Amino acid sequence: MDRFDAMRAFVRVVEAGSFTKAAETLHMSKTTVTHLVQQLEARLRVRLLNRTTRRINVTPDGIAYYERVTRLLADMDDAETSLSSASSVPRGRLRVDVPSPFARLILIPALPAFLARYPDIQLDMGVSDRTVDIISENVDCVVRGGEPSNQSMVARRVAELPLGVFTSPGYLALAGTPSHPGELENSHHRIIGFSWGRAGNLYPLVLHRRGETVKVQGRYALAVDDGNAYLAAGVSGLGIMWLPRYMSKAHLGRGELVALFEDWQLDPMPLYIAYPPNRHVSAKLRVFIDWVVELMNEAAPVHERRVRGHGASP
């Protein structure tokens, strides 16, 4: 038995909550992971996990051992990355998950420069707007908009994205142009809903003008959970939407979208990177985070003043 392989297998089983998920993230068979944990328990002469047909429970000895082992593995990574060759040339597989419009419009167009700077990093990028379980899915970090929903994660704010209200000329031709955001409530106007998280909550539109605040929930014919689909629905004339201005720029230029309520203000959307608090920040993760911060400092720098909280959007 390789002791460190067994330690890593045990840590992944605890974090993933199952042998199957741990095996997938370690690129091992379930049998191999099971044998490694069993051999570790035999060596330590204690039971680390209680297994049932439905779930795995960590024993008190297992909890204590997990806390010690995670620190030990992090120290090993620190020792390796502290070497000049390792720290100067970050390398290895990095798993990230980012929103689909952010990936398409900002991140991927800039990736050639990042990969040219760090050619030894292999980037596995999940592109979605879904809620990601960073621990069980073994993701190194996620980039998300809105206030962080999981307070147990380390979240670094990297930008505040200006928002706007938009729709298509075709929608306005049929429904008319609203002059006040209050007209969107209890009327013939339709909004496009963006559902966030597993509960599918729809967040309202909140606008401010000279001391007046208007909150609009509106009625929708369509709600989606993907930013690209949300934008496509607006361009197709399915209703009124609010989204980061970087998503609308090209469509405004082509006349496919029209901005509404330009004399009103919306609180900007915070953009943050989140990662597990007990996971070692490797050299490859550190340079990725620094690169995203650098990228967003050019596009949408963080405001010095913390804005009012609001729901997440694409």
Image (cartoon, helix red, strand yellow):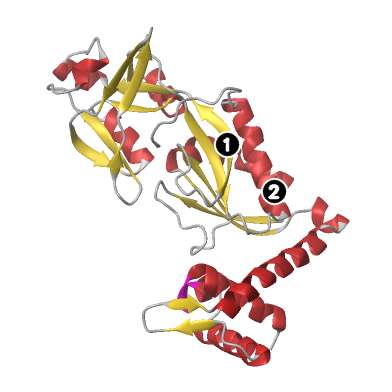
The kind of residue on which mark 2 rests is Arg
Q: Is residue 36 magenta?
A: no
Q: What is the secondary structure assignment of the residue under circle 1?
A: strand
Q: Where 287 sits versus 4, above or below?
A: above
Out of 306 and 88, give the one closest to the viewer.
306
Left of 66 or right of it: where is 306? left
Q: Residue at x 64, y 81 (%)?
A: 6
Quarter where residue 164 is shown: top left
Residues rendered magenta in the picture: 17-21
Give the percent coordinates (x, y) of residue 287: 70, 46
Q: Residue at x 49, y 64 (%)?
A: 136
Q: Can you identify the residue that label 1 sits on? A: 157
Residue 139 in view here: yes
Q: Where 14 sits versus 50, above or below?
A: above
Give the percent coordinates (x, y) of residue 119: 71, 52
> In 3D space, how far apart are the residues under numbered discs 2 and 1 (Cα atoms)?
15 Å
Among the two numbered marks 2 and 1 on one chain, the one whose residue lies closer to the N terminus: 1
Q: Residue at x 21, y 38 (%)?
A: 222
Give the percent coordinates (x, y) of residue 215: 28, 23
Q: Which mark is residue 286?
A: 2
Left of 169 or right of it: where is 54? right
Left of 194 or right of it: where is 121? right
Q: Where 139 sits versus 72, above or below?
A: above
